[in-house]
Image: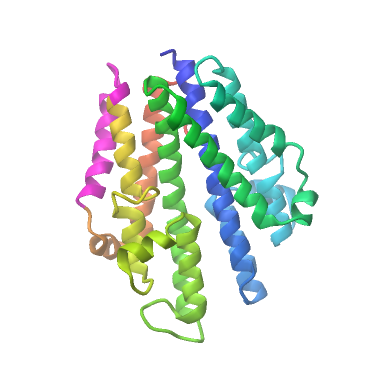
Amino acid sequence: MLSRTADHLFWMSRYTERAENLARLLDDAWQMSLVPQSDESSRQNWQALIVLNNLQDDYAARYDGVSADQVLRFMITDPLNPSSVYSCLRMARENAHAVRGTITTEMWETLNATWLDMRTRSFESIQGSDMGDFLEWVKMRSSFTRGVTLGTLLQDEAYHFIRLGTLLERADNTARTLDVKFVAAAEGSASDPHGGSGGTGGVTGYYRWAALLRSVSALEVYRKVYRDTITPARVAELLILRPDMPRSLRYCVNGVLRNLERVRNSQSAETERQAGLLHARLHYGRVEDILEHGLHEWLSDFLDGIYALGNGISKDFLVLGAEVG
């Protein structure tokens, strides 16, 4: 496969996944804003979204202060924010258009229709209707695209590069979400005046942990797997080490390794080795050791590994000079 074609497929899937992940985070923040809390707690909740996406400088250059309306506008419809929902859906469509002859008609029509719908929506119209409905629409459009891809595309090299982009983006997002949200939830639990048992920190703590799980579609999975009170250690175990949890780090890295094996070439041995090292850490890891080491430190190391893996894939397969965005 031509490297430019692989590059477009890889980034088409990354931008689609990124839009969905952003919608999940915004929905989480929106739902949490409906829970009684102080103004400072609310501000920190929205600020966390900016920090999580490494957009502090871009946001500060455009907006004064942090408020729900400003953050939502910046993260949803701002065309100058390269990580906004608007920008992600536009870039997904542009990359799909560049490889129109490689993807199926159903894939193209789904991505194109999503973008055509998105570009007609102003922030005022979204805000004036129902924010939750719009964010659910973004998530569902991503699910439609993924379903059409799985259901119509030949599972050849094109398919494997699409899966590589999706799983790398998902792993990066889950790690960042867990890092930022775990700290916020833990701090909220410790300061909750209502107290509580099981390490959840009472009513407020429960909503924080539940919101974290909900943001990665893991709340129902958690209940099915553990059938007990939500605790920090189990949340970390589920989102890091479970091989059958579709948004866990282990699931994503397992998929990255499998797809790398199917597209390997004469210069990708080192990238496969790096993926194998990440896989081994997750396959043989224990949550007790991760927490003892320090969750933030462990996740920072993991994110460095994902970044290096993305750059390795770019160097080995994609357009020369491309790097992880």
- Is residue 65 in sight in this rendering? no
> Which residue is at a point 56% across and 21% down the rendered structure image?
105
Q: Is residue 312 above or below residue 21?
A: above
Q: Quadrant of residue 43?
A: bottom right
Residue sitting farthest toward the bottom: 194
Q: Quadrant of residue 240?
A: bottom left
Q: What are the residue bounds of the magenta stretch?
A: 262-284
Q: Is residue 105 above or below residue 190?
A: above
- Residue 103 placed where, x, y %? 51, 21
- Residue 179 placed where, x, y %? 43, 58
Q: Main secondary structure of the magenta part?
A: helix
> Which residue is at a point 46% across and 76% down the rendered structure image?
189
Asked if the stretch drawn in magenta spans residue 111, the answer is: no
- Residue 243 placed where, x, y %? 28, 49
Q: Is residue 39 above or below residue 221?
A: below
Left or right of residue 188, residue 235 in this image: left
> Which residue is at a point 77% across and 38% down the rendered structure image?
120
Left or right of residue 305, residue 59 in this image: right
Residue sitting farthest toward the left: 284
Camera-side residue of 248 and 84: 248
- Is residue 231 in sight in this rendering? yes
Left or right of residue 175, residue 80 in this image: right
Asked if the stretch drawn in magenta spans residue 264, the answer is: yes
